[in-house]
Image: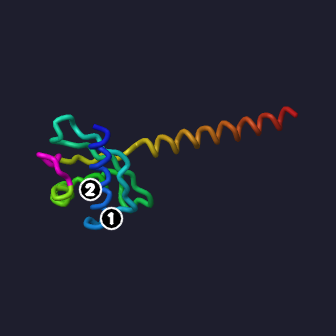
């Protein structure tokens, strides 16, 4: 399943570069694809740098392009069924960024406390 998911990810990333322009939303990249075992559906996770709209607006706009992505995928995938796509914001980047900021704050406070006690 990992091989299939990676193949779908590669194809979708190529389509995003060559065929479907989402630059009006920001810089969109696909980070992960989870294909169902029956190959009929896939969850596609994306991230956006330099957002030009809210997360909700971006999600609606990307999901409006589901049929277009599927149409472009069809000739490139040699599956019996081309999976139906659903796009989801990949929260892991945002979560990782939050964790880094918290660590930075902790270190800053620790350094401040150490200097006050010296």
Cα separation, mark 1 vs mark 2, equals 14 Å
Residue shown at 16% from the left, 59% from the top: 75
Q: Quadrant of the N terminus?
A: top left
Residues 40 and 67: in front is: 40
Residue shown at 12% from the left, 46% from the top: 81
Q: Quadrant of residue 90?
A: top left
User: Which residues fall within the magenta stretch?
Assistant: 77-83
- Residue extending farthest right: 118
Asked if marks 1 and 2 touch (Cβ < 8 Å), the reply is: no
Residues 85 and 60: in front is: 85
Circle 2 packing at 10 Å, graded few (<14), some (14-19), many (20+), is: some
Give the residue pinned by disc 2.
Answer: 62
Circle 1 packing at 10 Å, graded few (<14), some (14-19), many (20+), is: few
Q: Residue 2 — which label?
A: none
- Label 2, secondary structure: give it: helix
Give the residue pinned by disc 1.
Answer: 17
111 left or right of 66 in image? right
- Label 1, secondary structure: give it: helix
- The answer to whether residue 47 is above or below residue 114 is below
30 left or right of 42 in image? right
- Residue extending farthest left: 80
Q: Quadrant of the C terminus?
A: top right
Residue shown at 36% from the left, 55% from the top: 54
Residue 40 placement (x, y as % from top left): 15, 41
Marks 1 and 2, the one that precedes in the sequence: 1
99 left or right of 94 in image? right
Is residue 84 a member of the stretch shown in magenta? no
């Amino acid at each position: 399943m990992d091989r299939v998911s990676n193949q779908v990810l590669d194809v979708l990333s190529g389509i995003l570069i060559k065929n479907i322009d989402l630059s009006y939303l920001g810089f969109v990249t696909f980070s992960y694809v989870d294909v169902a075992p029956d190959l009929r559906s896939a969850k596609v996770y994306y991230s956006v740098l330099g957002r030009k709209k809210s997360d909700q607006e971006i999600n609606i706009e990307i999901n409006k392009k589901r049929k277009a992505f599927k149409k472009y995928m069809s000739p490139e995938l040699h599956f019996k069924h081309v999976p139906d796509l659903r796009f989801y914001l990949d929260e892991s980047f945002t979560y990782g960024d939050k964790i880094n900021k918290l660590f930075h704050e902790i270190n800053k406070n620790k350094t401040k406390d150490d200097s006050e006690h010296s």
